[in-house]
Amino acid sequence: MMTAADKGLMVCRTCGALCRRVRSTPQTRCPRCFDAVQFRKRDSIGRTWAFLIAALILYIPANVLPVTETRTVFGAQQDTIMSGVVLFWTTGSPFIAAVVFAASVVIPMLKCIALALLTVTAQRRSRWRPQQRAKLYRLIERIGRWSMLDVFVVTIVVALVHLRSLATIHAGPGAAAFGAVVILTMLASNSFDPRLIWDPVETTHDSGTSR
Amino acid sequence: MTRQLIACEECDVLHRRVALNAGCAAHCTRCGAELFRSRAFHIDTVLALTLGSLVVFVIANAFPIVTLEMKGVRNGSTLFGAIETLYREGRPIECGLVLTTTILLPLTELMILLYLLIPLRQGRLPARFRLYLRVIQAIRPWGMIEVFLLGVLVSLVKLSSTASILPGVALWAFAALTVLLAVILMFDPRHLWDLAEELAGGHA
């Protein structure tokens, strides 16, 4: 197998065209779409770590701070993401509880762990199971967006439950932190260059998946 | 020479381009990522879907998504109304996040598609098409109408135990919009690059 980089070709991320490097200019531009092209995403590892660490820091307020504050005639109650899931579970909607739990707890955690694993192995130029790591990357790219679910739930609930003296729900500070976590993990996976998984794998003869 | 070759975007291996049957996709022999897909629809179909989506988008935003009733007090909200509420509650970050992902970016994508497709189907290149096509590709991952729809459904379940809920026209419109956008997403904007290149006659 031969890679584009072996041939001195760069793939345009926007239009997919193969571009030859122009040595006279510091930044080669794609002849078809004029977008900047590089052999690999610029500072991929560093940027991925930066977004990932920022996401992990915000993960704490996202889970500790309340996302909603309910005021009824019976009193006030603050809910975090986790207590919202528990509420669904105990009020007889186990399916919805599972959906919210998956979107708000499992996916962000899975994404952070997976990205950390991918970045560490890419950084160490590991040749460990590239096929599986490539699949993992594709998976987290696809499911990351669904974590925004809770932010939208808060938006709708806050808008609807404004029933004068009967009941009102206000947005808490947790939702903004949570939304930021989702955006940051999306930026992190976007900064990671999956080709770094394959670069240490020899291309001259098919080394396959057994390593 | 480079015209017949394609490199896998996820592992960089070079492949020779082959002609595909309709509805087929070529995958990388090393990592399994999708290399390219045959054109799913004719450009007219994409244009029709875009126009349809814009109409549905207007309906989805003009009417209340759902109305809540509790002991004779009623309260309904449109998507924009909900975003405004967040702003009035002093939550500008959430407000901006929801506004961008559910209104601004999906609307921008549809408008740009319309702007590009109308001249392209007549065989003309629209002005600054490179810039607009690049914008579409950059904003695609950030439009989240389908996640929003799931969010609405979860909210309905959440509220159904305490109040009666009357689904509004916009709820159905959002469901239709999710389907329409999913179909539009099957069209790879890369085909527009190929088409634009053909129209430019090689000097692009």
Image (tube, coloured by chain):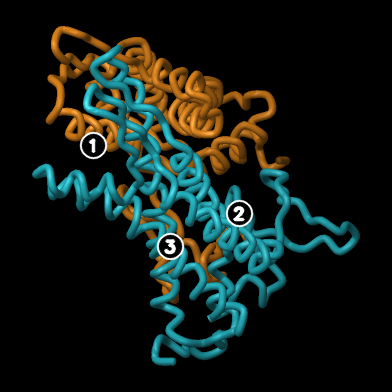
Circle 2 Cα neighbour tier, 10 Å, few/some/many (<14 / 14–19 / ≥20): some
**Residue drawn at x 54%, y 78% as measured from the top left:** A198
| Residue A139 placement: quadrant | bottom left
Mark identifier at residue A182 = none
Viewer-closest of A51 and A205: A51
Q: Color of chain A here? A: cyan
Give the number of the mark in front: 3 or 1: 1
In the drawing, does residue A90 fall left or right of residue A27? left
Residue B77 placement (x, y as % from top left): 32, 15
Amino acid type assigned to the residue bearing label 3 in the image: Lys
Viewer-closest of A100 and B198: A100
Residue B192 placement (x, y as % from top left): 53, 38
| Residue B41 placement: quadrant | top left
Amino acid type assigned to the residue bearing label 1 in the image: Val
**Residue drawn at x 66%, y 77% as measured from the top left:** A6
The answer to whether marks 2 and 1 sit on the same chain is no
Judging from the image, what secondary structure is the residue with disc 2 in?
loop
| Pointer 1 residue | B154
Q: Examine the rendering and report whether any part of residue A139 can be seen.
A: yes
| Pointer 2 residue | A13
**Residue drawn at x 30%, y 36% as measured from the top left:** A77
Q: CA distance from mark 3 to mark 1?
A: 23 Å
Q: Color of chain B here? A: orange
Give the number of the mark in front: 3 or 2: 3
| Pointer 3 residue | A111
